[in-house]
Amino acid sequence: MTEFLRSDVMIAFAVMTAVTVASRLGGYWLMGYVNVTPRVRRMLDALPGSIIVAAALPVAVNGGPVVVFAILAAMAVTIIRRNDFIAVITGMAVAAAARALGFGG
Amino acid sequence: MHATHIPKAPAYWSKAAIVPGIIAIGPMLPGTLAFGMAFGALCAQKNLTLAEVEVMMATVYGGLSQFVALQSWPDVLTPGAIATLALLTLTVNIRFFLMSATLRPWFGTLPAWQAYPSMLLVTDGGWLAAMRYRDHGGADASFYLGGGIVLYFTWLFSAIPGFLLAEQLTDPRKYGVDLVMPAFYAAMLVPAWKGPRRAIPWVVSGVVALVVHWLVPGWWFIIAGALSGAISAGLMDEREPQHPAGVSA
């Protein structure tokens, strides 16, 4: 750590930023050329749930029983209380407690 | 009741939705802090300087992609290694492409100089909260921007304590930090439930994501699953809404 901001690290960040910014702006830009028919509307409406499931399910399955159980606990709390904050805290607490008790994963 | 068939108001700006927007992302803040702290600790272990960490927080601004990149951070940044990092970042963050696409019907009437900078603040939590607001008929763009700005600065700050406390945070899993995003996702999925028919794309997405995760190394499973879910929704026949409008979920 002789340098404050190393140039090779900055180049790597710049390239990572470029692809991320392109992703963030690209979808919005592209939809300017797409006619939002009922079919496209249905596709857009299905995206939130689809992205959630696609991003979380493989991670959960890969994470083992502790992660799956913690996520189920978070969902159960949401069904009862409809409070996102309590759900996140529940998920973290269940996983932390299970690991403290010696369960792996 | 999902308001798909009801034309929604075009976007406008007002101060009224700033605070509700911030309250809506409130549940994300402790998790964002914890996630950012864990990331700061990881960066300290990889011998980045705090200034470098903050540059990354401010520019890349994608927690999962930053984590994934740092975990495979090379000792020497050759052009090939940087290209590998770029591809890795793209596969994790290409979901932002889909997210900003869904914001077009809402933000599309705003001038480009307002809409495009807003898209730079797209994150999982901020976007999900904004979509839920839009789903209930909201149109005030300040709701999304207010929450987005608070999330951005929380993220910027979060790495600092983590970086400085790195030795105490070597195992963030001990505190359940890896559950922050999945638990928030799960919490967002529950109110999005609008009957089994609407959940068919979720099942398609989940199955495709699991299979791709199993067969293809890396993070392609997110975009593969999400696109499959959306396409399956597009292929399903339209069915008229059976509930009277106005019955709110």
Image (spheres, helix red, strand yellow):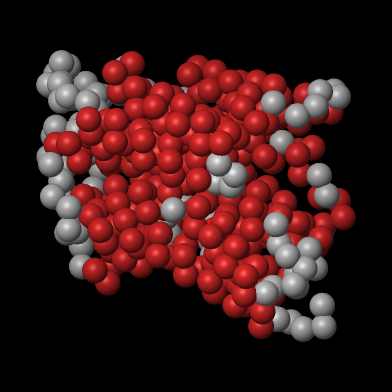
The furthest residue to the front: B215
Determine the image quadrant of residue A89.
top right
Location of residue B197 in the rendering, given as x and y in whole percent from the top left corner: 29, 18
B85 left or right, relative to B42: left
Residue B146 position within the rendered picture, expressed as x and y whole percent measured from the top left:
40, 56
Vertical comparison of B28 with A95: above or below = below
Left of B180 or right of it: where is B138? left
Tell me how many marks there are. Answer: 0
Res B179 → quadrant? top right
Closer-to-camera residue (A58/A93) = A58
Residue in the picture at 19% in, 59% down = A32
Position above or below: B28 against A29? above
Please tell me which residue lies in front, A44 or B142. A44
Q: Position of residue B229 (x, y in %)?
A: 35, 33
Which residue does the image show at 75% across and 56% down from the upper left?
Answer: B42
What quarter of the picture does the C terminus of chain B occupy?
Answer: top left
Relative to residue B221, is residue A103 depicted above or below?
above
Q: From the viewer's perspective, is B61 left or right of B249? A: right
Residue B14, position in %: x, y?
A: 27, 57
Is A18 situated above or below B207? below
Residue B182, visible in the rendered structure: no
Question: Camera-side residue: B157 or A54?
Answer: A54
Determine whether, in the image, residue B26 is placed left or right of residue A93.
left
Tell me the residue at 27%/40% (across/down). A44
Residue A72 visible (yes or no): yes
Q: Residue at x 64, y 53 (%)?
A: B68
Q: Nearer the viewer, residue B235 or B109?
A: B235
Quarter holding the N terminus of chain B is top left
